[in-house]
Image (tube, rainbow, N blue to C red):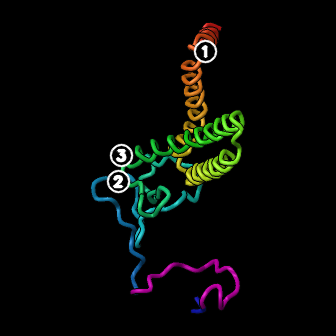
Amino acid sequence: GTGRRWPEETGQMCESCKLVCAAGSGPTPAPVLPSESAFCVLGSGRFHGTTMYMDGFRWTSLAPDETCIAFFSPYWVIDCPWKLAVACVLTILLGMSVELVSHARRRLLKSAFAERRPRWAVALAVCAQASSLALAYLVMLLVMTYSLELCLCCVLGLVLGPAATSCLSGLAASRGTGGLEQRQGLAALVEG
């Protein structure tokens, strides 16, 4: 090497550059493996997780040689199987909440306009819309980790959300009208 700092002094990509430990003349220390299992590799430094796999989708549970995934925060690192299971459950619930919040917004607007009180309803609906979008972006960030488990849980949550709102709407309708039409429609759907 030339000893010049990249890119300030060279101004171009250095194809032959290699990482060297600045503290000594030895090689860069290897990342720390978790002591109880080889679930993933804990990164060195202050935070031990990565926000995404850089080379595409992979099964987090089958990647013991990859850096552990951080779940939204560098403090929430998925470094063992039970943390992956908890992250998967939270991801499904997050995906479901996108539709649940949207459904609540639609019901709020419908009931408020029926009662002719649109001001507070519109304000609440705007807040619900912002919440729904924020939740959807959080789901997107989980897909962008490139963890197949988390990606599949996002899809599952986004599928279960409308199913849950449909069930909730069915329960509300059956309480209001005796549920006869709802049960007849469900029976026709199951039989047909």
Location of residue 40 (image quadrant): bottom left
* Magenta segment: 5-23
What secondary structure is marked by label 2?
Answer: loop
Disc nearer the start of the sequence (2/3): 2
Q: Residue at x 52, y 41 (%)?
A: 153
Q: Nearest to the eye among marks 1 and 3: give it.
A: 1
Q: Is residue 26 magenta?
A: no
Q: Residue at x 58, y 57 (%)?
A: 55
Residue type indicated by callout 3 = Trp
Tell me if mark 1 has few (under 14), some (14-19) or many (20+) residues whose alpha carbon lies within 10 angstroms of its own. some
Residue marked by disc 2: 38
- The disc at residue 82 is 3
Residue type indicated by callout 2 = Ala
Tell me if mark 3 has few (under 14), some (14-19) or many (20+) residues whose alpha carbon lies within 10 angstroms of its own. few
Tell me if mark 2 has few (under 14), some (14-19) or many (20+) residues whose alpha carbon lies within 10 angstroms of its own. some
Residue marked by disc 1: 182
Disc nearer the start of the sequence (1/2): 2
Q: Position of residue 35 (x, y in %)?
A: 28, 59
**In front of the other: 27 or 150:** 150
Marks 1 and 3 sit apart, C-alpha to C-alpha, by 40 Å
Q: Nearest to the eye among marks 1 and 2: give it.
A: 1
